[in-house]
Amino acid sequence: MTVLESIRQVRDRLATEAKSYEAPMVGFLRDLIAIPAESRAEGPVIQRIRQEMKEVGFDEIRIDPMGNLLGRIGQGKRIIMMDSHTDTVGIGDASEWQWDPYRGKTENGYVYGRGACDQRAGMACMVYAAKLIKNLALLGDYTLWMVGSVQEEDCDGLSWIYILRQDGIAPDLVLITEPSGLRICRGHRGRIEIEVCLHGRSCHASAPERGDNPIYRITALVREIEELNTRLHHDPFLGKGTIAITAIRSCSPSLCAVPSSCSIHLDRRLTAGETKECVLAEIRALPGAKHAEIAVLQYEQPSYTGLVYPMEKYYPTWVLEESHPGVQAAIETCQHLYGTVPIVDKWTFSTNGVGSMGICGVPTIGFGPGDEVDAHSVNERVAIDHLVRAAQFYALFPLVYAHHLEQEEAKGAGPG
Ligand SMILES: [Zn+2]
């Protein structure tokens, strides 16, 4: 029997078995929602996931020095890694919530709570997919690592730069389980955080002519940046690059003194083809930035284990071509499972893909339960039907992908 025949045979059993895990999956998801874990405080939630991985019977479970959790299934040739970050954003103003965000609720086919879709659901589905792989013997010539990563909400991509450079695993593909509404995502815009500072000369505000007020000079730059935003590059797939001033700060010994410096904080979203170098050159070319100090900000907060792994706040754009075997295998997997052609799209928000593919160059795709619009909202939720479908997808995808690569290799080898 060929791999494809066995996939067809297993499809119905996979659907039935995944459906039978609905209640335990919802239970596990709600356990995860009940453990608050903002960035740099993921320890307890990592331990809860580790316990579930143990019960499912992962072949190896480890926690790296940064605190990322890595669970392995199988030991075949192709190496596939799936990611779910384990931190969530905070709850903001508690009075905006109509129920306890960490207790959540199950209602009308949805699970609600902080982290329900971003990203507790992805983790619950991955762990139960491993159970499906074990129970239905869906192992193939692949090694599958399921990762619970840290600090994504604080610094997207950081954990994956660490995993790929320090943990000694070289995957063929990374699959991100951020909410995608069960669409296949193959990229998103990047971003960069920049501080532009103009220096002046401080003096007593009662005689401003003795000094040089940088606030007056920075207003020209502010207008130039507003205008720059209107002429940034537009990419047909990813959309337009943008620039926004999100803060303005001056430094002065007192409110009765002309400040010595004034700086603006820039949030620059990068579309296809826009890099750190071109963005910095573009700002430097503005007349108002002539004597400015321009710096990309640094992230250097310790993880919950105390590890500091500094990174520039440059999160490069990434796009994987639609013809890539990873995207094609994801399309095939959806066709096998749901009998429909899936939508291939992009994310509006940023993910750990900026680290895995944007910086480290490992082909990356995305597929996740929950809808992007519900992430970070006070109505955060995920459809229970998505949990069941995504678990099936994660269980079958590695086999289809490994098979796809083998076919490509056979084609490449040619006759004789
Ligand atoms: Zn997320």
Image (cartoon, rainbow, N blue to C red):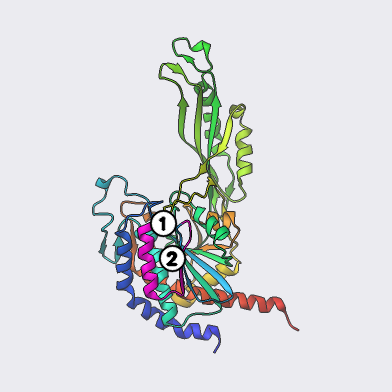
Q: Residue at x 42, y 69 (%)?
A: 126
- Image quarter for ligand 1 equals bottom left
SS of the residue under disc 1: helix
Query: Looking at the image, is mark 1 or mark 2 earlier in the sequence?
Result: 2
The answer as to whether callout 1 falls within 8 Å of ligand 1 is: no
Q: Is residue 381 above or below residue 210?
A: below
Q: Position of residue 262 (x, y in %)?
A: 50, 26
SS of the residue under disc 2: loop
Q: Residue at x 52, y 14 (%)?
A: 211
Q: Is residue 127 above or below residue 200?
A: below
Image quadrant occupied by the C terminus: bottom right
Region rendered in magenta: 43-66
Q: Position of residue 105 (x, y in %)?
A: 25, 61
Dots 1 and 2: beta carbons under 8 Å?
A: no
Q: Is residue 2 above or below residue 352?
A: below
* Residue on which disc 1 sits: 372
Instruction: Identify residue type, mark 2.
Output: Leu
Residue 215 belongs to magenta span: no
Q: Residue at x 32, y 67 (%)?
A: 28
> Which of 6/27 is in front?
27
* Left or right: residue 9 compared with residue 109: right
